[in-house]
Image (cartoon, grey):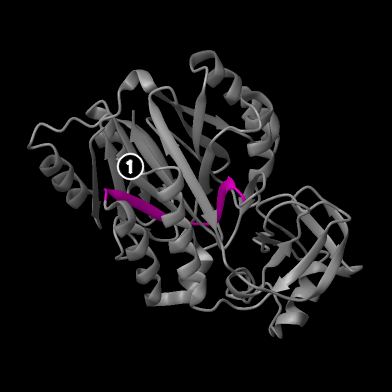
Amino acid sequence: MKAKSLKGKSTEEIKNALEQSMTDGFKPTLAICFISKSMDRIAISNMLDALGISVFGCTTNGEFIDEETEKGSAAILLLDMNKDHFEIYFEEYPEKNYREVAIRVAKKVKAKFSKPAFLIGTSNAAADGEAILSGIEAVAGPEVNAFGGAAGDDYSFSETFVFTNGKESDHAMVCIAVDEEYIKIKGIATCGWKPVGTEKLVTKSEGNHVYTVDNIPVLDITTKYGGIENVTPENHNLLIEIAANFPLQLQREKGDPVMRPGLVIDWSDHSFYCSGTVPQGSKVRFSLPPDWDVMEKVIKGVQKLKDTEMPEADALIVFSCAGRILAFGPMMTEELEGIKKIWNVPMAGMFSNAELARATGGNLEMHNLTTCCVALKEK
């Protein structure tokens, strides 16, 4: 399978780069598109559609095809994958029935491929990505390979979108199902944020909606711990500060903790929505703002994936949490450069609102402040 990556800050730049990529006879069948809301994603999607290219698209909080990060741009990974070996599915969840929608999609996929793997994009910051993964797992089995990320909106905390050929929505999932009989797909999710303080009890929650921790409204205990001031709806940087520096770490009996920052605040009771489930009665810890060794841990984790499971790859897709670039700033290039060098193949990635993958030694889960790297190889 041949792959090429391209980027641009206008529809015209993308058009020119696309045309240039095909001058040697390259005929892509699939485009993985990470596009800022400031660009005309519909025009780009239609351009790809006119060439018979299937589109998997997410809006972003930033984009990259190498170690150089961008804002307000489009990053696209083009693949000439055999059309018999993949299918794109698009399904809305206006009733917040995330698990049921995912089960419906997974049943369609299983009817087509006996051994499928999934690459998923979700929209709507309050969506429960873990419920989506649970639905897929219910049909495809506990060992299914499933990876992805939640769309962003340039940090506006307004609307996020996923899109495909002729469709887009701010409350939907887009999914590439690949046939693992022909396409090998492996991934890893690595975080590195360090916990601080004692374990605390989630005293009231429903799904991904957390109300109280130690019987204190979760927003209040988080901002008190973090020493955050100006805790008002008018403080548009509040969610960024919470997500990037003071997320909850959900403790697990098996595997590493998973990060659960607040992404949507309910000001009526100072509760907030996380990207994944936080069960009532579970234990959480707070986090220290990250140190530089967090990036080193990610690079080592990806190198281990190559050494143990994926010696060769045709292409690489990266979902890196928006909170990471907020925390690391220009230093983020070091992490991306380290990842790129491991296989040195075409890469495209986005800064996402959340990441979907299997936790180290654990289950399929929705992550935050995590880098999820997904490698593809045609057998």
Q: Is residue 87 left or right of residue 285?
A: left
The x, y position of residue 314, in whole percent, is 29, 40
Q: Quadrant of residue 191?
A: bottom right
Tell me what residue is drawn at x 45 percent, y 43 percent: 309
The x, y position of residue 214, in whole percent, is 90, 69
Element type at marker 1?
loop
Q: Is residue 160 visible?
A: no
Q: Residue furthest left?
A: 23
Which quadrant of the figure contains the C terminus?
top left
Tell me what residue is drawn at x 47 percent, y 69 percent: 295
Q: Residue furthest top?
A: 111
Q: Is residue 28 left or right of residue 202?
A: left
Q: Is residue 259 above or below residue 74?
A: below
Q: Is residue 326 visible?
A: yes
Please, what is the dominant secondary structure of the magenta stretch?
strand
Tell me what residue is drawn at x 13 percent, y 40 percent: 19
> How many neighbours does mark 1 have within 10 angstroms: few (below 14), some (14-19), or many (20 or more)?
many
Q: Is residue 331 above or below residue 364?
A: below
The x, y position of residue 231, in whole percent, is 71, 78
Q: Is residue 119 left or right of residue 242?
A: left
Q: Quadrant of residue 283?
A: bottom right
- Report the amino acid beneath label 1: Ala
Residue under label 1, please give it: 313
Q: Quadrant of residue 195?
A: bottom right
151 or 117, nearer to the observer = 117
Magenta-highlighted residues = 345-359
248 or 228, nearer to the observer = 248
Q: Is residue 143 magenta?
A: no
Tell me what residue is drawn at x 77 percent, y 81 percent: 224
Q: Is residue 348 magenta?
A: yes
341 or 28, nearer to the observer = 341
